Amino acid sequence: MCNHHQEIEESTDRCCPRGGRVRGFMQPWLLLLLAQRPAHGYELMERLSQGEATPAADPGLLYRTLRQFEEEGLVRSSWDTEGGGPARRVYEITAEGLDYLHAWVVNIRRTRERLDRFLSEYEAYFHSKKGGEQDVRTR
């Protein structure tokens, strides 16, 4: 592999999470999962860890985020004492939480549009001229 490609891979490792996961994306995912159905924290962790598109399920971050959401009125919780074993806190989204989720979606769409514009410009520049990568390296 040439040094240029190695530099790109190394810089990609520094700026982007591995495995295609997007940092700071747990909030909308939690709200979406809770919009789909109420759940306890352990179930949310399991559902988050099922695919590459979802954020890594760090238990500490997950529970801090749920507590913050509850303080802000985005979710509410209650104790589930049915079934065997200890009681578990079950979380459900509120109307305010749904509004916040919808706002996230608007922001995500805007971000996606900006990323698409960037990628279009990038593709147009590097694929429209032969040796575009060479031009960048020699500047």
Image (cartoon, helix red, strand yellow):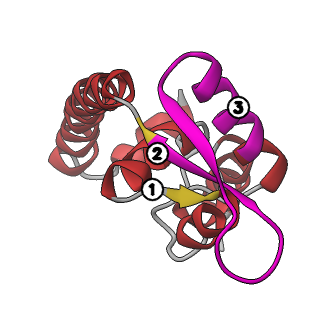
Secondary structure beneath label 2: strand
Residue wearing tag 1 = 38
Quadrant in the picture for the N terminus: bottom right
Q: What residue type is labelled 2?
A: Glu
Start-end of magenta stretch: 63-92
Q: Name the residue under label 3.
A: 67
| Amino acid type at image mark 1 | Pro
For label 3, the crowd category at 10 Å Cα-Cα, with few meaning under 14, some 14 to 19 and many 20 or more, is: some
> Is the residue 22 above or below the residue 3 in the image?
above
Front residue (pair 98, 38):
38
In the rendered image, residue 94, in percent from the top left (x then y), is placed at: 38, 31
- CB of mark 1 within 8 Å of CB of mark 2? yes
Residue 125 x %, y %: 23, 37
Say which mark, if any, is on residue 92: 2
Q: What element carries label 3?
A: helix
Q: Does the magenta stretch include residue 66?
A: yes
Instruction: Decide whether residue 64 is among the magenta residues.
Output: yes
- Mark 1 or 2, nearer chain start: 1
Q: Is residue 66 above or below residue 38?
A: above
Residue occupying the far bottom of the picture:
84
Nearer to us: label 2 or label 3: 2
- Gap in angstroms between the C-alphas marked 1 and 3: 15 Å
Q: Point out residue 113 in the picture as x, y percentages from the top left corner.
A: 19, 31
| Amino acid residing under circle 3 | Arg
